Image (spheres, rainbow, N blue to C red):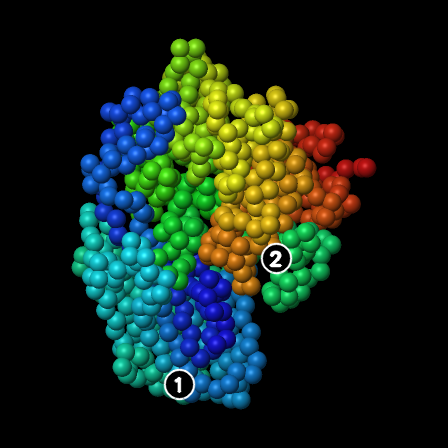
Amino acid sequence: MLGPKRWEESLVSGNGTLGALVPGDPSKERIIFSHEKLFMPEYPPTEAPNLASHMDKIREWVIAGKGDKAAEFAVELGNEVGIEGLIWTDPLIPACQLEIETLNPEKVINYARGVDFESGETITAWETESGFFERRLFTSRPDQLIALHIAAPDSDLNIRVRLATLPQTDEEMDHEAEAFMEDKLIEDVRTKVDETGWLSYTTEFKKKWDGSLKGYLVECRVIPTGGTMKASDGWLLITDADELFVLSRILLSYDMPLPAKTALHEYEIPDYKKLLAEHRAVHGEMFHRFSLEIGGGEYFPLAEDLQASSSFGNLNPSYLNQLCKAARYLLISSTGEIPPTLQGIWGGTWRPAWSGDFTLNGNVPSAIASGLNTNFREVTEAYINYMFSMYSDFRDNARDLYDAPGIFVPSRTSSDGKTYHYAKPYPHLFWYAGGAWTSQFLFDYWQYTGDDSFLREKAIPFMLDAAAFYKHILVEGEDGGYNFIPSYSPEIGPLGHHPVVINATMDVAALKQLIRNLLYLNYAGYLTEFDEQGWTSVLKGLPEYGIDEEGDLKEWIWPGLKNDNSHRHASHLYPLFYEVDPEFKERPELIEAAKTAIEKRLEYRRGKQGAEMAFGLVQKGLAAAHIGDTEHAFECVDWLCNSYWSPAQTSYHDPGEIFNVDIAGGLPAVVTEMILQSSVDMLILLPALPEQWSQGSIKGVGTRCGVTADMKWDKGVPQKLHLKAHRTGKLTVLYKDQSWEIETTAGQDIHWEPEW
């Protein structure tokens, strides 16, 4: 067998909506098709457990240190409304696979496969005694289809093709509770082969409810040049053809009956090169908006050789450059109407890890982390559109769970926004940072774009709704202080305690950030009827960040709760994920405590090839970069590059395991923040540049201060800075202890070369 042994190492192609996994087997190819919204209806809507009526009891338990009882009681409340066991999100599943088999296979003499990041085209090429063969595939953005071209310039093509169900693996049929039970989930599968060159694959789901996905249709149009076509035993046989062109589309249906055909029937067929050129113009523009080149490395054309040239402690800068390109390619290819799931838009299993959903308590924020600073706003916009599509669900959550106004953003979503996914060990219903975290992305989108219409129409209403929920659930003490009781830090508890406790630093920090942003908007005149005095009082009443006896930043701001640093998450570093929390600037000891926290969480990962959950390294890397902790930021990048990428330059969740795109957004975000950072009126040059990156260039960096920035540096010092201004105003350029004031005019190009 040539090509990968695992689907996770397939080449990937996608236009954000449609995707293809291309293994690249010359004789028995299995191309897996996917769709960004193909979430199989498995978990019908349930009534929410009414926590509101019992919050006094829950809080009494939590204050008494009996969070386990509170969590167990929440599970019992779920049982009363029909929630039995841990409800998962509807899983992202593959649509089907296009099978291509050579009728008379020959021994392969030469073989190569690869992907062109600039066009999204995958290429599989090989030679036999009969000559040269080649398959090229890409997924068109303008035409919303998957295009496949098969050529045999030295001989005839003799192959058979069909659409088929992805076979189940032994692993998917293990563990009864999680096994894929086709008879319980799939009502009907129909395939059709027509001698005129049409293939179709229709799936109807068994579980149906109002608004659920009822099924889908995959359709292929097979167009040979020369030769003949014949239907036989469920296959389409193509013999003596010069070349073959296959166009594929996927159509989801939320209604019955399911559609009988796609728009391919009305499609005027262009040639492959024209179709590719039109797609390349769109995809390539996105890809080339941003670039990074760090010098000092050795480049190898073959991906395997380049990967082998780098190891932890010896990161090859050329490998880092290539991975940032690969990451951008993955991100673009999996950004459509909605943002990338845990798996982007791809999947080769009926039972994807964690349902292949949107895990909002860490994964999704990592996947979209580079949307603004690396100038790929589309992924941030897709995230915003997705979150707003569930706005009514978030309102229902707040009302039904907590009898509260505003919105409650849960930890996990897929086909809807109110899956009550929780259990005693994972009490996600008590994680409150979701609304504020989403608000930060909205606020930051405005800072980067300056779009006042977006701010007024979307960001501000969402932020105010999030704030309304927090005002309802906060517990005011006799001293005028405010506390989160209960509170949950994903996905861990203090040493010796259940995870349901008090004042998770993440909850406190996210709310402080939200309040400060609202106060800023109020001061700038964007808000009306805003209770400035009341919210200022809440901000002052929230607990100060804590430092434990070992100098570690506390993950819970409450006496007696000690950090458990043997863990993958680093949620208590939230105050440093974006712009540094003002309290950290005012209290230098907090910066030192954060450095200690990063070190302790990295200690856990050393000796484990970086350990599970790569996005935890993104969290630590961003925090380190923002406080100038260069050594730890570089260590995070070192692990991210050397433990979590396949030979096909696709990314993993764990070292060498679990296909996952979290770091496709996270890795470029960390690297960019180490090189350039911004605030509303400041651009910071080389704030966390390691000595290993003494020379390089970066282009197309988005900023909060109204400019797009390009920069070259040498010997660790900025040499050239080019700014494209989008607003009129002033900004400060900062490098170490030196600063320069620059006036900008919208549309202006500013070239700046410091004299050293």
Q: Which residue is located at x 36 percent, y 27 percent?
A: 66
Q: Quadrant of residue 180?
A: bottom left
Q: Is residue 260 above or below residue 40?
A: below
Query: Foreground: 491 or 668?
Result: 491
Q: Which residue is located at x 35 percent, y 77 percent?
A: 161
Q: Farthest front residue?
A: 496
On residue 322, the disc is 2
Q: For this view, does 580 lie left or right of residue 422?
A: right
Q: Quadrant of residue 96?
A: bottom left
Q: Amino acid at mark 1?
A: Leu
Q: Is residue 568 visible?
A: yes
Q: For this view, does 652 lie left or right of residue 257?
A: right
In which quadrant of the rendered image does the C terminus lie? top right
Query: Foreground: 243 or 662?
Result: 662
Q: Which residue is located at x 30 percent, y 74 percent?
A: 198
Q: Quadrant of residue 185?
A: bottom left
Q: Residues within 10 Å of mark 1 (few under 14, many from 20)?
A: some
Q: Is residue 169 above or below residue 45?
A: below
- Per the image, label 1 sits on a secondary structure element best described as loop
Q: Position of residue 504 (x, y in %)?
A: 45, 29
Q: Mark 1 highlights which residue?
A: 103
Q: Which residue is located at x 38 percent, y 16 percent?
A: 476
